[in-house]
Image (cartoon, coloured by chain):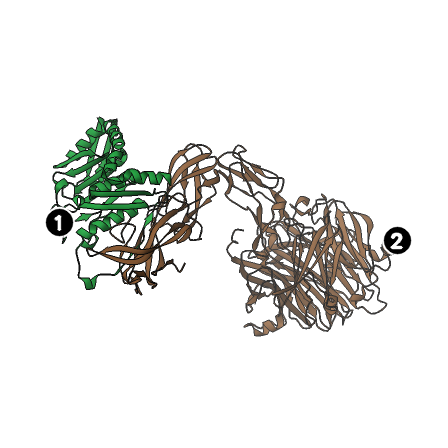
């Protein structure tokens, strides 16, 4: 109980997030500068490649990528005597327009312009996000409920359901945490979720540069399958542990 | 499991004599010895010149005996044969000749003349041999027939030699054409030879095709109401005592089990005052002197005893008559003794000394016979017994061995479908004595508490040595006595040998340093199946390579090193030489012995479909390059191994069948016995812990970009994944996700679901079971507008929907009932 209260306290509000990021920043710098004698990366596409890379070197990552003919090509890269950062740089730059930067202890990968794109739901402001003693899956659902208010298509009142049911399975060992955030964007909420839970990589897969929902937001998909996600379910994102198998 | 029996082939038995001449009748008795197969026999009557007349086929149920009146059968046949005589051929298909026991009962109508003739069979492997017997013409009015039968298709040249009591010979040649028979009169031959006396010897010899020769000699006197069969013995000059020494005495031993003594058993129903004259005719069939000794095991109405008889020194070809009535003087044999079993022992080769017993009163009208035989057996199949107002039967079984034995008499009736069983432990030389008429009359119960039906009149029987299988020690006897005429005729049973011996297992698999018991099946030619004859092969087991396998005295194999070799044993069984005798024969069954790796344990011993399980196999003999097989649907990869342990991954296909899969290790070309690996199919979920429900006094949800407020609750707990037996699947890493079906009924107006993975009803998404096969349901919940009325939560429901949990590669569907105030899983 004491630990949970303590965690809640240090995660409260944006300044608190900065306070936890100092240790995380030191940690990730150490990981990025580590030298690797040899490493070979094979993946079905760019998105999976980033996820696999992050898992292999245990990097907290936030990944935004767009499905395209280029990014959907198989990735096969090898390195010798390179640092993790050098390898990551080569991987990211294997796709034109992509870059990475480290912020708040998280490696963020995105294409140029996505950070300020108003059609990117990750840039939506969240006035308040509050979770008490929950696992990350529930927290993620809560965040998604907030985002869907803005992103999902409005429907006629008469057709709307007046009830919703949930079922949420989680791993038995998933840690519970509390989190209170205010005036942060969705990307920052996701950063906080991976900081507080055992899910360490979040991935947003945009369907294409010009695929928009009825509300004008870029459509998303999941790494787990190629199914089209309907507007009512938009947006979606994936969160992985470092030891999860690649989808 | 015993091996399957050999295929049925054409078989043929021959009975040397039948007659439908005036005043005579012939009754063919056919018994099916098989345990479970019907037997169809087609008899054909042969005339002396070999011409055949087939009779109608007869089908006999197992253990049943059927009687065919030859006169009636002849009347129905195409060729009229009334007033004829000849031999009978019996044709049938069976794996062995011994499936059939056949005899011909010859009767003289209106007289106390009845005797039986057993079937024999051609033995083409015996080129040289003789038929040895005794002639006896007790009165001038006594007639006789000596019948010679050629069972084969080759002409047979025989010498018929008659000897007077002192051994003087008269010989003549007779030619028998193919399938021919010849009926001679010894009396006439004696007159031609100029011999006198009332008894002597007969020898019928053949220097080629001797195995095709059969002979029958019987005497009769219609005036005296008398008949007697004078048994003849087949003598193989190459036979050795060891082949016929069933109780291991090293001597040629003959037994006559039912010699009626001077004081007749009241059971024979002879008139008061009849005194019998028991006598033995013992003949030396060789041209050199022979010695023999006699002993008696007698029985009276109240007691039994033993007595030594005279020592005999027989001159070449001499026939000697021993008057047993003289011995019944109260010193050697008690005066009131009724029966004696006679044992004759000589230091000769088999059938060099032969004997015939007869016991008649001075008129010859009343009396009985008992045949001498050397045969001891573990199983005797007896022919027809008869009990009615005019006849009755007595059966005896004796122990000819040197140790006590448990004898079982089974009396079959109702077409062989029912049996009456008696058991008795017999000391050496002891006999059990069964008066069938008495059993029926007195309603004696058998060992199972059953009685013979009071109206039962006939059936078959068998005697079995329960203490000895391969080589038994029982001898047998049966008489059927005629209450009208006071005559008792004996009937024989047939011994049952084995014609094949096979080891139980070929190959036998033995785990390294483990043991496996082997034994020997003997093919029982009578019953048509394999029997356990292992005890006859004890103490003779051997291994060809003791570095691979060792074998103890009892056939227990112990694996010493992975590899293959052979093991063998040897022993003697009653066999099936010249039918119907069952001489001892040595068999040497052998088989391959494979010493295999041994799996002692497998861990884990189970795993769910669609997963890869790291498995450790512990045991021995895994060698340097073991391979592991786990059956269809499991792909095994060996990751590391030593001689005693294998680490492997079992990739269990999603389509693998649930249940036990046999896992084996192959090393050095040998495959271990299997050990089970249980393939689990996720089949059910059980709620095991942390079951809490939290009402939501005010809950919100988003629908179509709008937020709604309602009431509901959240239930959370831990699920345990169970297999098809309801046992927990303790396996981590099984991906878990869920999907909902259509809600019906839906009073809560539930129109959307948030499931484990997004979008709803898809998966997987990284949620999996822990090592115990568990996962958490953290939010089985509902939030509905109808559950809130004026800011107050109300009750309602249920909205019912199916929820399918995808666990690994399996799907488990359950029913969720959403209420405003609760959520139920499968009604719980």
Q: Which labelled disc corresponds to residue B547? A: none
Q: Secondary structure at mark 1?
A: loop
Dot 1: chain letter:
A
Residue B806 can be seen, yes or no: yes
Q: Secondary structure at mark 2?
A: loop
Chain ID for label 2? B
Residues under numbered marks 1 and 2 in contact, where contact means CB atoms less than 8 Å apart: no
In this rendering, position of residue B745 left or right of residue B344: left
Q: Residues within 10 Å of mark 1 (few under 14, many from 20)?
A: few
Q: Is residue B185 above or below residue A243?
A: below
- Apparent colour of chain A: green
* Place of residue B64 in the rendered image (x, y in percent of width and height, measured from the top left): 61, 65
Badge nearest the viewer, 1 or 2: 1
Residue B20 rendering spot, x and y as whole percentages? 64, 70
* Mark seen at residue A211: 1
From the viewer's side, name the closer residue of B27 and B36: B36
Q: How many marks?
A: 2
Residue drawn at point x = 30 percent, y = 44 percent: A136
Is residue A135 left or right of B350 when viewed as pictured? left
> Which chain is drawn using brown?
B
Real-space Cα separation, disc 1 to disc 2, in angstroms? 128 Å
User: A179 or B257, which is in the foreground?
Assistant: A179
Left/right placement of residue B665 relative to residue A113 reads right
Badge 2 local density, few (<14 within 10 Å), some, or many (20+)? few
- Relative to residue A144, is residue B599 depicted above or below? above
In front: A170, or B395?
A: A170
Give the quarter of the image for residue B326: bottom right
Q: Quadrant of the C terminus of chain B?
A: bottom left
Q: Which residue is mark 2?
A: B331
Examine the image and state in which quarter residue B278 appears: bottom right
Query: Residue B11: percent from the left, percent from the top?
Result: 55, 58
The answer to whether any part of residue A45 appears in the image is: no
């Amino acid at each position: 109980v004491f630990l949970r209260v303590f965690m809640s306290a240090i995660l409260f509000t944006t300044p608190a997030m900065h306070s936890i990021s100092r240790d995380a920043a030191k940690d990730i710098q150490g990981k990025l500068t580590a030298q690797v004698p040899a490493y070979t990366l094979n993946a079905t596409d760019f998105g999976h490649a980033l996820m696999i890379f992050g898992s292999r070197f245990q990097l907290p990552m936030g990944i935004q990528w767009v499905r395209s003919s280029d990014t959907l090509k198989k990735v096969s890269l090898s390195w010798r005597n390179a640092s993790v950062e050098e390898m990551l740089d080569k991987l990211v730059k294997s796709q034109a327009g992509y870059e990475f930067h480290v912020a708040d202890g998280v490696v963020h990968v995105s294409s140029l312009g996505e950070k300020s794109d108003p059609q990117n739901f990750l840039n939506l402001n969240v006035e308040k996000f509050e979770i008490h003693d929950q696992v990350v899956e529930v927290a993620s659902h809560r965040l998604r409920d907030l985002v869907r208010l803005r992103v999902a298509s409005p429907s006629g009142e008469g057709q709307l359901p007046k009830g919703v049911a949930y079922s949420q399975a989680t791993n038995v060992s998933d840690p519970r945490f509390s989190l209170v955030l205010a005036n942060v964007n969705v990307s920052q909420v996701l950063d906080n979720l991976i900081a507080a839970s055992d899910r360490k990589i979040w991935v947003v897969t945009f369907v294409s540069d010009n695929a928009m929902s009825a509300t004008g937001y870029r459509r998303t998909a999941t790494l787990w399958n190629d199914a089209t996600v309907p507007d009512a379910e938009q947006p979606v994102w994936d969160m992985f542990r470092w030891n999860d198998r690649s989808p | 499991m015993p091996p399957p029996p050999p295929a049925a082939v054409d078989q043929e038995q021959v009975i040397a004599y039948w007659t439908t001449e005036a005043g005579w009748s012939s009754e063919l008795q056919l018994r099916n010895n098989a345990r479970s197969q019907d037997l169809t026999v087609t008899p054909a009557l042969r005339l002396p010149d070999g011409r055949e007349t087939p009779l109608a086929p007869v089908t006999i149920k197992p253990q049943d005996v059927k009687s065919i009146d030859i006169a009636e059968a002849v009347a129905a046949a195409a060729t009229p044969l009334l007033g004829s005589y000849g031999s009978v051929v019996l044709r049938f298909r069976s794996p062995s000749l011994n499936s059939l026991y056949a005899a011909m009962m010859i009767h003289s109508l209106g007289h106390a003349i009845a005797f039986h003739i057993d079937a024999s069979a051609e033995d083409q492997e015996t080129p040289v041999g003789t038929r040895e017997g005794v002639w006896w013409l007790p009165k001038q009015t006594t007639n006789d027939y000596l019948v010679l039968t050629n069972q084969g298709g080759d002409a047979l040249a025989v010498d018929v030699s008659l000897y007077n009591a002192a051994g003087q010979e008269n010989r003549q040649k007779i030619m028998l054409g193919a399938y021919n028979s010849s009926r001679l009169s010894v009396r006439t031959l004696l007159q031609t030879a100029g011999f006198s006396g009332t008894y002597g010897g007969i020898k019928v010899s053949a220097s080629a095709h001797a195995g095709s020769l059969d002979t029958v000699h019987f005497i009769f006197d219609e005036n005296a109401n008398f008949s007697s069969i004078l048994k003849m013995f087949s003598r193989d000059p190459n036979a050795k005592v060891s082949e016929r020494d069933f109780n291991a005495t090293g001597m040629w031993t003959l037994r006559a089990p039912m010699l009626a003594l001077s004081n007749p058993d009241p059971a024979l129903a002879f008139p008061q005052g009849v005194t019998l004259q028991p006598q033995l005719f013992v003949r030396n069939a060789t041209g050199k002197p022979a010695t023999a000794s006699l002993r008696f095991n007698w029985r009276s109405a109240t007691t039994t005893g033993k007595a030594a008889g005279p020592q005999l020194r027989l001159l070449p070809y001499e026939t000697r008559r021993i008057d047993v009535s003289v011995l019944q003087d109260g010193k050697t044999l008690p005066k009131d003794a009724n029966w004696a079993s006679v044992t004759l022992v000589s230091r000769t080769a088999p059938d060099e000394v032969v004997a015939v017993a007869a016991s008649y009163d001075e008129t010859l009208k009343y009396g009985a016979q008992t045949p001498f035989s050397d045969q001891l057996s573990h199983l005797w199949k007896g022919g027809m017994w008869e009990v009615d107002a005019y006849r009755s039967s007595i059966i005896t079984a004796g122990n000819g061995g040197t140790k006590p034995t448990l004898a079982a008499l089974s009396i079959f009736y109702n077409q062989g479908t029912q049996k009456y069983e008696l058991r008795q432990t017999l000391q050496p030389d002891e006999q059990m004595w069964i008066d069938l008429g008495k059993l029926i009359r007195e309603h004696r119960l058998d060992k199972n508490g059953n009685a013979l039906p009071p109206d039962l009149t006939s059936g078959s029987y068998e005697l079995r040595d329960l203490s000895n299988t391969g080589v038994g020690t029982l001898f047998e006897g049966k008489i059927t006595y005629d209450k009208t005429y006071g005559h008792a005729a004996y009937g024989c049973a047939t011994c049952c040998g084995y014609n094949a011996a096979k080891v139980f297992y070929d190959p036998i698999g033995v785990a390294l340093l483990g043991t496996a018991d082997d034994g020997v099946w003997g093919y029982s030619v009578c019953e048509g199946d394999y029997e356990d004859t292992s005890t006859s092969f004890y103490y003779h087991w051997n291994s060809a390579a003791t570095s691979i396998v060792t074998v103890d005295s009892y056939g227990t194999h112990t694996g010493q090193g992975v590899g293959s070799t052979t093991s063998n044993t040897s022993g003697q069984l009653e066999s099936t030489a010249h039918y119907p005798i069952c001489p001892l024969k040595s068999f040497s069954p052998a088989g391959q012995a494979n010493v295999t790796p041994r799996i002692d344990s497998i861990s884990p011993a189970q795993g769910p479909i669609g997963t890869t399980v790291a498995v450790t196999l512990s045991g021995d003999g895994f060698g340097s390059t073991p391979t592991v097989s786990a059956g269809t649907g499991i792909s095994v990869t060996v990751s590391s191994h030593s001689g005693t342990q294998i680490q492997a991954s079992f990739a269990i296909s999603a389509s693998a069948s649930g249940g036990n899969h046999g896992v084996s290790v192959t090393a050095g070309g040998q495959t271990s016995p299997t050990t089970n690996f249980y393939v689990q199919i996720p089949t059910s979920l059980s709620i095991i812990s942390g079951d809490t429900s939290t009402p939501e006094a005010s809950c919100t949800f988003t629908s179509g970009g709008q937020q709604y407020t309602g009431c509901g609750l959240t239930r959370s707990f831990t699920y345990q994944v169970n297999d098809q037996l309801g046992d927990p699947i303790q396996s981590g890493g099984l991906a878990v996700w869920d999907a909902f079906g259509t809600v019906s009924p839906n009073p809560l107006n539930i129109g959307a679901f948030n499931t484990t993975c997004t979008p709803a009803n898809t998966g997987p998404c990284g949620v999996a079971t822990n090592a115990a096969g568990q996962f958490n349901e953290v939010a089985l919940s509902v939030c509905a507008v109808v559950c809130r009325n004026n800011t107050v939560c109300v009750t309602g429901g249920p909205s019912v929907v199916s929820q399918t949990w995808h666990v690994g590669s399996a799907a488990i569907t359950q029913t969720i009932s959403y209420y405003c105030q609760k959520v139920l899983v499968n009604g719980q």
